[in-house]
Image (cartoon, rainbow, N blue to C red):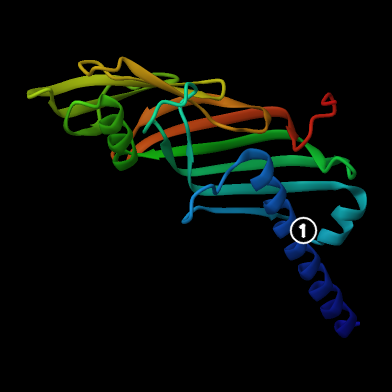
């Protein structure tokens, strides 16, 4: 019996490893994560035994982690790409709805998206156009879905020291750039249907954005044609 248990465990872990890799591949194609040479993405299916969950088409916990990918502004402004340091989604109560369409649904999703100040400084400098490098750092006053950030540097030969707002609503991030030639920019992040931003705050290390979703659709929606 001990030998059979070991063999079953090996088979189970082999199956979940393959499923993790396949789910990661499908998520890359659907949502465009890991679109940089140093980007990384991984989907992990939790729970044991995996084979029992797979037969029933129901999984208790699935995590999706993507690092170092980018999103363009909604108007495709030159140089407006925004690097995302990390995105993590915890999906609970996942059920496969269609094997043919490779789609699934999750009862609940929670997660975080992290932006580094280095990446924010880079995009602000590129969007500002005229002047030296600009620096984005933490500012007090984050509230709800609005994170407050300080923008400092030189703009058109004049010292700049102002406070901007990074607003996270729905699946969009919008950043105001007071005192610069460009008033602001908007980026849309590809997220599973039903997941949206719920809060944003500036921390000492970067801007952290919370995500929540209910009845989340993964892959193709059952309403897609």
Q: Nearer the viewer, residue 190 or 203?
A: 190
Q: Position of residue 128 (x, y in %)?
A: 25, 25
**110 to 64, vertically: above or below:** above
Q: How many marks?
A: 1
Residue at 70% in and 27% down: 214
> Which residue lies at the image location 39% right of the left edge and 21% below the top edge?
185
Q: Secondary structure at mark 1?
A: helix
Looking at the image, residue 72 lies above or below residue 9: above
- Indicate the position of residue 144 as horizontal and vertical percent values: 43, 19
The extreme front residue here reads: 78
Between 147 and 186, which is closer to the camera in this rendering?
Answer: 186
Q: Residue at x 20, y 16 (%)?
A: 179
Residue 121 placement (x, y as % from top left)? 27, 36
Extreme-bottom residue of the structure = 3
Q: Is residue 104 above or below residue 36?
A: above
Image location (x, y in percent) of residue 195: 63, 28
Label 1 crowd (10 A; few <14 / some 14-19 / many >=20): some
Identify the residue position indicated by label 1 in the image: 19
Q: Quadrant of residue 190?
A: top right
Quadrant of the image containing the N terminus: bottom right
Residue 171 appears left or right of 16: left
**Relative depth, front residue between 88 and 98:** 98
Question: As displayed, is residue 221 above or below residue 52?
Answer: above
Corner quadrant of residue 183: top left
Q: Residue at x 85, y 26 (%)?
A: 225
Residue 104 horizontal side relative to residue 91, left or right: right
Q: Quadrant of residue 93?
A: top right
């Amino acid at each position: 019996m001990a030998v059979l248990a070991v063999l079953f465990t090996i088979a189970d872990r082999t199956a979940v490893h393959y499923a993790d890799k396949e789910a990661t591949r499908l998520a890359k194609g659907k949502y465009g994560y890991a679109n940089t040479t140093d980007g990384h993405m991984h989907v992990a299916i939790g729970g044991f035994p995996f084979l029992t969950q797979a037969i029933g088409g129901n999984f208790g916990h699935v995590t999706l982690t993507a690092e170092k990918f980018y999103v363009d502004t909604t108007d495709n402004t030159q140089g407006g790409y925004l690097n995302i340091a990390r995105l993590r989604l915890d999906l609970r109560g996942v059920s496969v709805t269609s094997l043919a369409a490779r789609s699934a649904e999750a009862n609940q999703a929670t997660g975080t998206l992290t932006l580094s100040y280095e990446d924010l400084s880079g995009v602000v400098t590129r969007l500002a156009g005229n002047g030296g490098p600009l620096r984005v750092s933490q500012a007090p006053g984050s509230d709800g879905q609005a994170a407050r950030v300080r923008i400092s540097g030189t703009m058109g030969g004049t010292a700049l020291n102002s406070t901007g707002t990074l607003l996270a609503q729905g699946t969009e991030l919008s950043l105001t750039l007071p005192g610069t030639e460009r008033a602001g920019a908007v980026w849309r992040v590809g997220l599973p249907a039903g997941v949206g931003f719920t809060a944003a705050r500036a921390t000492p290390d970067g801007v952290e954005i919370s995500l929540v979703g209910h009845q989340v659709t993964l892959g193709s929606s059952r309403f897609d044609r």
